[in-house]
Amino acid sequence: MEVKHVEALFTGLKYLYFSGVSDYLPWLRGWDVDGKEKIVREADKTIKALQNPIIDERIRQWRSGERKEIDDLIDVLVTLKDDLINQPDLMAKAVEEIDRVVGKESRLVHESDFGSLHYVKACVREAFRLHPVYPFNVPHVSTCDTVVAGYLIPKGSHALLSRYGLGRNPEVWTDPLKFDPDRHLDGTGDHNSVVLAEHDLRFISFSTGRRGCVAAVLGTCMTTMLLARLLQCFTWAPLEDGKGVIDLAEAKDELFLATPLVAFPKPRLAPHLYPKTN
Ligand code: HEM
């Protein structure tokens, strides 16, 4: 069931930006000439069938007062972790930071720790730069004639930013294909400026402006918490039967991994610190 769920989520993501003939010839809508509408409808049906009962049950529990505490994170594996697994020295630096700020003995990472987890946030920023989930941002249409970097963008143009092109632009980033979180630390030791939003659009995380992500703060918390707890709670290693490294090659037709990530987690904290499930 979990496999079906993840497949349906990724299908939805894959076709989110699909542009078909009917975008330009609206009278073809409903005929599904590209066949993509059917694929997306089926994925949507699967997602709703699997998610809605869980969400409805949660709503019922909150409303009835049965549930009083928030106790789980949505478990998504980020490509970032593969980069760290392949570069143990970087992973050790992030883990060392978490151990120094939070400790290993008494508790898990809390949101209040984020202000001190600069290297962890730099890792997330680097992952956003190097591994966008999709090549472009959400399409926008210019509402008036605009000049950007000397180019005229006439009113009514469809504007697509290349996430891939921005994040890997050699004129902006030194050695752009290298996963190097240190590039986001300013070298002064004052790392309070490590934020995941990038308003200068040197890469796209939450985008910017009026139609930028409305939940940049929530998205930052979710992503930082996810990575910090994955690193705090487990030691991650490639499987023994592999070649000892994670294959980071991207698929030919999308930016996800060509070979799915399989890594081995080994608990590194005392058993009582792990949340219990019923
Ligand atoms: C790591 C997590 C997230 C990332 C990287 C992210 C990124 C983005 C990006 C790039 C956009 C498009 C901006 C554009 O059109 O140029 C966007 C839009 C949006 N995001 Fe997020 N997002 C995240 C999490 C969330 C969460 C958790 C929520 C809601 C709870 C959310 C709600 C929205 C909404 C409503 C928009 C549409 C805004 C508009 O068009 O006015 N996002 N997000």
Image: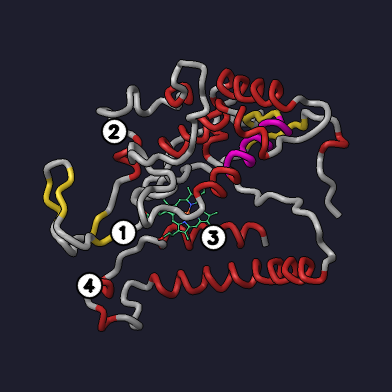
Question: Chief secondary structure of the magenta span?
Answer: helix
- Of circles 3 and 2, the one toward us is 2
Magenta segment boundaries in residue numbering: 223-234
Residue type, numbered disc 2:
Asn
The label shown at residue 237 is none
Q: Earlier in the sequence, mark 2 or mark 4?
A: 4
**Residue at 34% across, 51% down:** 136
Q: Which residue is mark 2?
A: 169
Mark 1–mark 2 Cα distance, whole angstroms, equals 20 Å
What residue is disc 1 on?
A: 139
Label 1 or label 2, whichever comes before in sequence order: 1
Instruction: Where is residue 11? Give x, y as percent.
Output: 48, 61
Q: Which mark is residue 24?
A: 4
The amino acid type of the residue labelled 1 equals Pro
Colour scheme in the image? secondary structure
Q: Is residue 133 above or below residue 196?
A: below
Crowdedness near tag 1: few (<14), some (14–19) or many (≥20) residues, C-alpha within 10 Å: few
**Quadrant that contains the N terminus:** bottom right
